[in-house]
Amino acid sequence: QVQLVESGGGLVQPGGSLRLSCAASGSVFGIYVMGWYRQAPGKQRELVARIDSFATTTYADSVKGRFTISRDNAKNTLYLQMNSLKPEDTAIYYCNKYPTPWPSWGQGTQVTVSS
């Protein structure tokens, strides 16, 4: 069973930046497409970015040009650099496999963008 631990969230003003990290247990992390998902209050969880084993990335239109996903397979860690943050980016952010997530999600990390 893979365990996922997200960190790096916080309160930031509009236009600010945050860097999220996701530490994954297990030795097969590097072979999977990994994604960052987010869930805002009252909304469904959505995929915001994904990265495959060749470091090819794909982004949701809402974050394209502002967010950068990356991975360090040697450290079993996934990252999300978030710049030019907007209030609508406020959500709990999770990492998991894509397109079929592992059934056990981490606790997520709260990102709040507010002045």
Image (cartoon, rainbow, N blue to C red):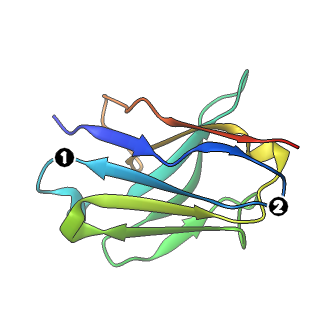
- Disc 1 marks which residue? 25
Left or right of 53 on screen, residue 9: right
Identify the mark at residue 79; answer none if there is no mark. Answer: none
Badge 1, how many Cα within 10 Å: few under 14, some, many 20+?
some
- Disc 2 marks which residue? 15
Examine the image and state in which quarter residue 53 appears. bottom left
Examine the image and state in which quarter residue 92 appears. top right
Residue 20 lies, in percent from the top left, at 50, 54
Identify the residue shown where x is 15% and y is 57%.
28
Q: At numbered mark 2, what does the secondary structure look like: helix, strand or loop?
A: loop
Looking at the rendered structure, the kind of residue marked 2 is Gly
Identify the residue shown where x is 38% and y is 50%.
22
Identify the residue shown where x is 24% and y is 37%.
3
Left or right of 9 on screen, residue 53: left
Looking at the rendered structure, the kind of residue marked 1 is Ser
**Foreground label between 1 and 2:** 2
Q: Name which of mark 1 and mark 2 comes first in the sequence.
A: 2
Q: Quadrant of the N terminus?
A: top left
Residue 65 lies, in percent from the top left, at 72, 73
Identify the residue shown where x is 50% and y is 49%.
8
Residue at the limit of the structure toward the top, as seen here: 42
Q: Quadrant of the C terminus?
A: top right
Q: Looking at the image, is 49 positioned above or below residue 108?
A: below
Left or right of 36 on screen, residue 102: left
Residue 64 lies, in percent from the top left, at 71, 68
